[in-house]
Amino acid sequence: MKRSRIIGTGSYVPARVLTNHDLAKLIDTSDAWITERTGIKERRIAGPDETTSELALRAARLALGAAHVKPRDIDLVLVATATPDMFFPATACLVQDRLGVRPGPAFDISAACSGFIYGLSVADQYIKTGAARTVLLVGAELFSRIVDWTDRSTCVLFGDGAGAVVLRADSTKHGLLSVHLHADGSQWELLNVPSVGSQPLTALDQVRAAKTAPRPQTIRMKGNETFRVAVRTLEQAAREALEANQLDASDIALLIPHQANMRIIQATAKRLGLPMSRVFVNLDRYGNTSAASIPIALDEAVREHRLSEGELVLFEAFGGGLTWGSAVVRW
Ligand code: UT7
């Protein structure tokens, strides 16, 4: 049976570091509060000229290099993002163009922080059906552009960055063993960023509104409720993945969770009985980079030699939608 195997990873984060101490000079917060409640110490913030596609491109180039794959060998380009450069074209099209990938399919995936796991599922369907042999999947975000920098309950949480993987059809025992995806749109209000389609304006109203200041489109989150649902849902997602593969948590060499909050990560690990030594954490340095968080963490895990051939990796994510999911990979 054909499997989707991750044959290369790459990541890129902007150079500018914004620490908790920097933030405490801008808003009513403190390093102590942010560290204790979230585990975040600093995050990266893109420069004014950096775009989501630029971040994605840099991560993608590194992943292609690690995989020893040429752009002409890519059959499908996927970018998971909630902060695309444009409404259209898709950021994946911009990446495809700048990489010099031939004109096969290229499209974005909108599943907020679960975007990378949704992307794994899409890539896997293409590969298993033979529609693609080699897929480039990128998670890239510029959340610094959509946070409300006056809202201390959200702006301290997020950061910018991109991570990428190259997946290829493989007939060995290595690769993606399972992906499970879920969504519950009834809980959309917990975490969202309004866009143009939701604005109840007539065409005439829009002309009038255009003469006034534009409405900011920023993140709205019910943090407490989201936290509770996240812990419960992530445990379920991990158990679903383990059961589907007849695995026990002790079989997992490394859990790479979406990096939203240290307390969520610790609570999930505890519920699964996984020691933190087998959980990858980098949110102290990057904050929550939404769809980019898992591929950045995976790339760092690879570079730190945290994964050996044949070991099992569990990914899990949760985000706006609500969306959530899990995946198991034999490395
Ligand atoms: O990636 C998608 C998924 N996202 C998540 O999973 C995020 C889930 N939620 C969370 O991570 C947490 O709910 C937060 C980190 C957002 C908030 O932590 P919390 O422990 O739930 O704090 P809280 O919202 O209950 O706020 C506690 C207090 C409040 O003050 P009062 O009302 O008790 O006086 C807030 O005003 O902390 C205050 N507060 C802050 N204080 C200093 C909120 N934000 C800050 C801040 N600095 N940045």
Image (cartoon, rainbow, N blue to C red):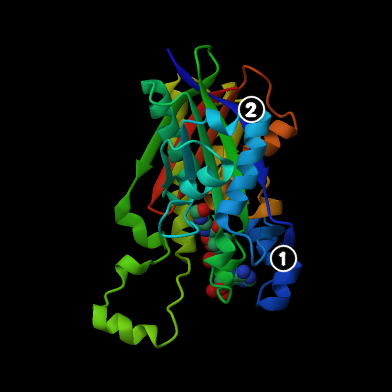
Q: Position of residue 187 (x, y in %)?
A: 34, 56
For the residue marked with disc 1, what is the amino acid? Asn
Q: Is residue 220 left or right of residue 307?
A: left
Residue at the image position 49 percent from the left and 45 percent from the top: 79
Residue at the image position 73 percent from the left and 77 percent from the top: 25
In depth, the one of 70 and 35 nearer the eye is 70
Q: Position of residue 209 (x, y in %)?
A: 35, 84
Dot 1 corresponds to which residue? 20
Which quarter of the frame holds ligand 1? bottom right
Which of pointers 1 and 2 lies earlier in the amino acid sequence? 1
Whether residue 245 appears in this view of the structure is yes
Evaluate if marks 1 and 2 touch, with contact meaning CB atoms under 8 Å apart. Answer: no
Quarter in which the N terminus is drawn: top left
Q: Examine the rendered structure and indicate whether residue 228 appears above or below residue 274.
A: below
Q: Is residue 95 left or right of residue 125?
A: right
Quarter in which the C terminus is drawn: top right
For the residue marked with disc 2, what is the amino acid? Ala
Residue at the image position 62 percent from the left and 33 percent from the top: 64
Question: Label 1, label 2: how many angstroms apart (C-alpha)?
Answer: 36 Å
In depth, the one of 302 and 77 nearer the eye is 77
Q: Examine the rendered structure and indicate whether residue 2 appears above or below residue 142.
A: above
Question: Is disc 2 placed on a helix, strand or loop?
Answer: helix
Dot 2 corresponds to which residue? 67
